[in-house]
Amino acid sequence: MLFGSSAAICGAVVAFAMSVTVARSETAAVHSSAVVIAASGDAIVGAASMYNPFRSGWREGGSSTASGERYDPSVWAAAIKTSLRQKFGGVQFGARPKYALVEAAGKKVIVKINDVGPLMPGRIIDLNERTMRHFDPSLQLGVIHDVRVRPLAGDYWIPGPVG
């Protein structure tokens, strides 16, 4: 009797684990194919650069972002040009984060837009360190040209690469 109960519990745990794995893979597949469809508005095309207020020589701003979050170089995040704030639904202190699809050099990534700033002329977005490494692993380019940025409709995107 004890053996039968243990086997039943073990079987239930395995079934649950498998259902979670399937659900995660289905979510990832739906998420990647739905990104382009859910992109709202026209793409903004320009250049992207990187910002990190913790690197020596950073000249402006601080470690807090416009959304009130602390800058984190390990998440998928970016700052948009101040004049684009409204196109992205407003990036404001304490508000829900906004999301964008960033495309360049055959790669796509969803980023959380949690900051705004007066970027250098011709630049439309400043990527944090992790996001920039997706496009430029060595961080040697400094600027990525012909970047397409699309605001994403909705509030519940999972930032990261799109397959």
Image (tube, grey):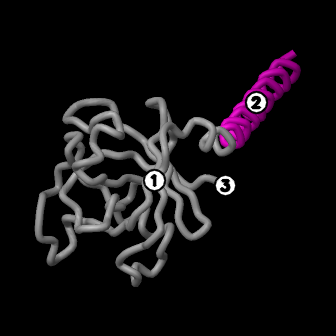
The mark closer to the camera, 1 or 3, is 1
Task: Please state if 132 lies on the left or on the right of 8 as rendered.
Answer: left
Vertical placement of residue 30 versus 149, above or below: above
Main secondary structure of the magenta stretch: helix
- Cα separation, mark 2 vs mark 3, equals 22 Å
Residue 126, x across and y down, in percent: 32, 61
Q: Which residue is mark 2?
A: 19
Vertical placement of residue 154 versus 145, above or below: above
Magenta span covers which residues?
1-30
Please tell me whether mark 1 sits on a helix, a strand or a loop.
Answer: strand
Vertical placement of residue 56 versus 132, above or below: below
Question: How many numbered tags mark residues here?
Answer: 3
For the residue marked with disc 1, what is the amino acid? Val
Please tell me whether mark 3 sits on a helix, a strand or a loop.
Answer: loop
Task: Please state if 99 lies on the left or on the right of 3 as rendered.
Answer: left
> Toward which corner of the image does residue 20 lie, by quadrant?
top right
Residue 26, x across and y down, in percent: 73, 36
The residue lying at 24 percent from left, 48 percent from top is 83
Task: Please state if 99 lies on the left or on the right of 28 as rendered.
Answer: left
Going from the N terminus, do you reach mark 2 or mark 3 first? 2
Q: Which residue is mark 3?
A: 163
User: Answer yes or no: do the residues labelled 1 and 3 have beta carbons within 8 Å?
Assistant: no
Q: Which residue is mark 1?
A: 149
Quadrant of the frame with the N terminus: top right
- Cα separation, mark 1 vs mark 3, equals 17 Å
Please tell me whether mark 2 sits on a helix, a strand or a loop.
Answer: helix
For the residue marked with disc 3, what is the amino acid? Gly
